Image (tube, helix red, strand yellow):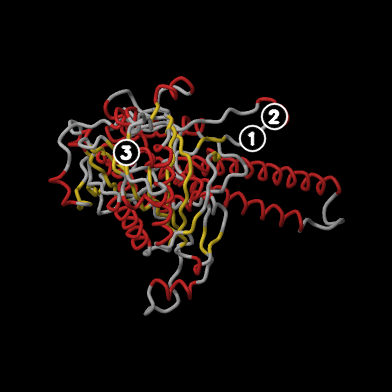
Amino acid sequence: MIPRNGSPHNQSFKRATSIAQRWFQSTALEWKRPSIAPKPSLNTRHIRENPELYKQTCIDRNYKDQQYNPREICRLSDEWVRLQRNARDLRQLRNIVRTKLASRPIAGDLSETDANSQGSRLLAEAKQLKEECGKIELQEDDLQERIETLAIDLPNLTSKETPVGSEPRVLGYVNESMAKQLPSSARNHSYIGRQFDILDFEAAATTSGWGWYHLKNEGADLEDALVQYALSVAKKHGFSRVTPPSMVYSHIAGACGFQPRDQGGEQQSYVIAQDERRRKFDQEGNPEMVMAGTAEISFAGMKANATLDVKELPLKIVGSSRCYRAEAGARGLDTKGLYRVHEFTKVEMFAWTLKDEEQAVFDTMLEVQKEILGSLGLHCRILEMPSTDLGASAVRKIDIEAYFPSRHTRNNGWGEVTSASICTDYQTRRLNTRIKSDTTKMAKRLAPTLEPTVQSSGFPYTINGTAMAVPRVLAALLENGWNEKDDCIDIPDVLLHWMHGKKQIHRKK
């Protein structure tokens, strides 16, 4: 039933529509997709059929503005259907006019004046109908663009495993037996690093500002060792190595779920300045580029506009890269030292899988993370992250937090060191990454007992996970590995191969 004007329901609907339209306008200004960008293929039908599900998802994940997008998508879709009907009626009238033009009386049946008059009238009517059809087509294109923009801004749906709210659920521990042996004194890795001449924040502040750092001497060696060790463990679990670029197109980052600003309006990405001289010759300009906050963006973009063969899946890759985050955070305990910085080295795992096979790869990534952190001698806890902590692309996320003695007064000493997420087809639909249509193979892979009539969704699922975030793991190693008795820093045995056999770091004389 259509609500009457002035009714509370109608006023609420108008308010929702107004907010959705403002969001569309602001988003359109924020993200301009160039002509070379992959064309998204979003499942707007599922949104139309489940608007309340998507609205509740936005509410649960703190996407307050986007909660009105599903209803606006439904309204615009209804308008699009109405235009489709009008266009169909006009095309039928055009066909009738064309038939009349083709079947006009032959010379002699009508006077020359009457024949010319009838022909002119039919031609004018055909021209008018063509113009009206053209206007409707423009309106349809505009509606499709607005629907697509609103749908793109929606976050992924949420897994049933994900706790609703802001509190994570503890799933288990790594090196749980170490809990009784944890150091009681508050050890700050910044202080330790300065004392042993392996960290320098002051010099970096002079060259780059707050949030950057220099790794020196054994600190730089430890970074290399951590990267190489993480790569070796991931490769042992079937991941192939790739070295990604650190600069990416902003539309690729957006397709992966990374926005230039977070929900609070804080800047997330460093944007590369455009060459204004080029704009004089190229109206569209060079596509905007940003510094990648994670190799996940580069990896996902590798298969943009590509079609994967079923035989390739799961396709698992791993690589190290420099990562850039503009939102290093406010000054304070949570952001001191290496815990939250603007630039850092990270080893990232990424995979494409078939639907219903993503869990196995997700579990493999978690095993890699647990093996690395466990062998480094860190006491950690594994968390099922809540809905408000999920990024736009993730349907489920598990974090592992290590114990930092310096953080004993904040979050009981715990701090995130790795993360792993399942993104379903959120990224591949936006990047136009498809699966080669071979339903016979798909059927055998997904359910060997079924007849080969199983249809592929056409889009693979993506999973990503941190193998090594160097600054935070390095900070945890310094704080937990500081041997106060011998005044040295103990190096984990698994890193000795890349530390040239050095087992301890001593003060410089």
The residue under label 2 is which amino acid type?
Answer: Arg
Percent position of residue 258, x then y: 44, 40
**Mark identifier at residue 3:** 3
Instruction: Estimate the spatial distance between the alpha carbons at disc 3 and disc 2, rounded to whole Å.
Output: 52 Å
Percent position of residue 414, x then y: 22, 39
Q: Nearer the viewer, residue 278 or 404?
A: 404
**Which of the image's four quarters has the C terminus?**
top left
The residue under label 3 is which amino acid type?
Answer: Pro
In the picture, measured across the screen, residue 52 lies left or right of residue 21, that is left
Q: Which residue is mark 2?
A: 278
Percent position of residue 240, x then y: 48, 59
In the picture, measured across the screen, residue 86 lies left or right of residue 443, that is right
Q: Which residue is mark 1?
A: 286
The residue under label 1 is which amino acid type?
Answer: Asn
Q: Nearer the viewer, residue 4 or 480?
A: 480
In this view, the residue farthest toward the front is 509
| Other residues around mark 2 within 10 Å, as few (<14) / some (14–19) / many (≥20) | few
Labels 2 and 1 touching (C-beta < 8 A): yes
Residue 243 visible in rendering: yes
| Other residues around mark 1 within 10 Å, as few (<14) / some (14–19) / many (≥20) | some
Percent position of residue 232, x then y: 42, 56
Q: Mark 1 or mark 3: name the one nearer the start of the chain.
A: 3
The residue tagged with tag 1: helix, strand or loop?
loop
Labels 3 and 2 touching (C-beta < 8 A): no
Instruction: Estimate the spatial distance between the alpha carbons at disc 1 and disc 3, rounded to whole Å.
Output: 47 Å
| Other residues around mark 3 within 10 Å, as few (<14) / some (14–19) / many (≥20) | few
Q: Nearer the viewer, mark 1 or mark 3?
A: 1
Q: Residue at x 48, y 45 (%)?
A: 297
State whether residue 111 is above or below residue 266. below
In this view, the residue farthest toward the left is 180
